[in-house]
Image: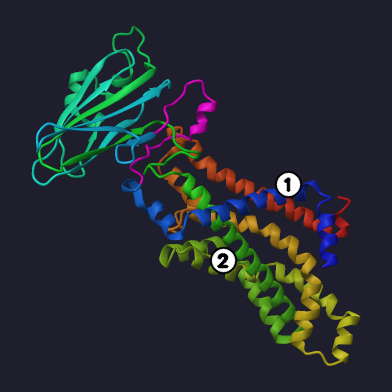
Amino acid sequence: MIAFKNSFRELLRYPSAIVGLLVIFILLGVAVYALVTIPYSEAIRLWRGGEDVWYQNPKYASPEWFNFFTSKKEPLSFLANTADGSMTKTVTSSTADISTVEMTYSFDYTYDDYPQEIILYFSPKFNEKLPFVSIAWYTPDGRKIRIADIAVDRKSSYRFSQDQKLQKSLRNEDVMQALFVDPHAENPTVVKGQYKLVISGTTFEKDSDLDVQFVFHGKVYGLAGTDKYRRDILLPLLYGTPIALAFGLLAALGTSVLTMIIAAIGTWYAGWVDELIQRITEINLVLPFLAILIMVGTFYSRSIWLMLGVTILLSIFSGQIKTYRAIFLQSKEASYIEAARAYGASDRRIIFSYLIPRMIPLLIPALVSSIPSFVFLEASLAVLGLGDPVLPTWGKVIDDAITDGAIYRGLYYWPLEPAALLMLTGLGFAMLGFALDRVFNPRLRDI
């Protein structure tokens, strides 16, 4: 315990270690937050849900913080609903069967561009006679635009931009532009101010009712933006953190510990055991590591846990075995090993209690430094189309961005956000590993 405190105190002398620890603690905090707030089943449901789950979000929307760095302010996305009281609803009964339902919503519009889409989702309650609604749009400059007069069926929706009758009445195929731009201005610009949506509905049966959800698809959304399927990219950025850290840590830990144990066993027993281990290592060194992973993912399964197992299996017999073997050959002849033999210590006790513990100072820096390589490996497999199809990961986000041509569309936020997290992870572990190497290897302290 005292040795650990001294090592930790020595570690904190290096600024790179402090920065590395800070980055790692932030990543661990994000991972814990994601696991606590988003259960595994819910994360999978959201990631694989598609537009039926994310219908409230716009497509290809940039993050909201983009507005802080541009002179042209893009509209934010929002929604209002009569069911939760965020949208005003007034019911007036004319007769025993006929009622009038008026639903209104006003909002201030201070942006320099018009939105992607406006959608109304109706939730009527009736037996046989369908309710009827009239939709009107009021602009800040006093114009009233009659949108539509339609009968409302169960779970029906109305999309402003897809109504061809509205396009003809506005004399503009771009309905969103016509609703937010003054058509009489010499240089058409977005009219800023308070807009108002008024929906006047009529029900024709006793106990009938009508609710509506007003969904406004702007051009920016959330902290991370959205993708082709309207999914909030913040989900895979958050949930990809524990997946990436777990994959990297388990792969690094499994590989480092097993490699050291195998090298120690081979060195101690020598003879045919050592020869077999060395021959397996030499064969494994010439095997195409990535090609084997691609074959497994293509012809068998893309499960992240299978890929983790194959990665550990192929990484155990690496060149590190020969490094450990050279050190173990020196330790094998040390006086404390001779003393252990003299009092009758078993081979197992000598290997696990005397040989391997002496290698821990070399194991820790190597283990920490190797974590980013496995994190990048998991992301690389996903970019190659071999990532786990179920899990929301950083690599999957980059793969989707490349597939959908995010760079050509100018949607740089899409691939750069997970790429930045990958680089941050690599930087944090690399800086900590470098400092640990200096602490446990005194020869490097003056470098």
Q: Amino acid at mark 2?
A: Thr
Residue 140 appears in the rendering: yes
Q: Nearer the viewer, residue 119 or 196?
A: 196
Q: Nearer the viewer, residue 301 or 432?
A: 432
Q: Which residue is mark 1?
A: 19
Residue 437 percent across, percent down from the top left: 79, 58
When the figure is inspected, residue 173 is found, relative to residue 207, above or below; the finding is above
For the view shown, which residue lies furthest in the top direction?
186
Task: Label the magenta part by its dominant secondary structure.
Answer: loop
Q: Is residue 33 left or right of residue 351?
A: left
Instruction: Report, in whole angstroms, how far the alpha carbon at label 1 lies from the one at label 2.
Output: 29 Å
Amino acid identity at mark 1: Val
Please check the rendered image and state whether residue 322 is part of the magenta-colored stretch, yes or no. Answer: no
What number is the disc on residue 311? 2
Based on the displayed image, in which of its 4 quarters is residue 123 positioned?
A: top left
* Observer-nearest of 81 and 221: 81
At horizontal 73% and vertical 71% (from top left) the residue drawn is: 322
Residue found 8% across the figure and 41% down from its top: 129
Residue displayed at 29% across by 21% down: 179
Q: Which mark is residue 327?
A: none
The region drawn magenta spans 54-77
Q: Position of residue 262 (x, y in %)?
A: 69, 77
Helix, strand or loop under label 1 = helix
- Quarter in which the N terminus is drawn: bottom right
Question: Which of the 4 quarters of the picture holds residue 368?
Answer: bottom right
Q: Position of residue 364 (x, y in %)?
A: 74, 63
Residue 51: percent from left, percent from top = 33, 45
Q: Is residue 380 visible?
A: no
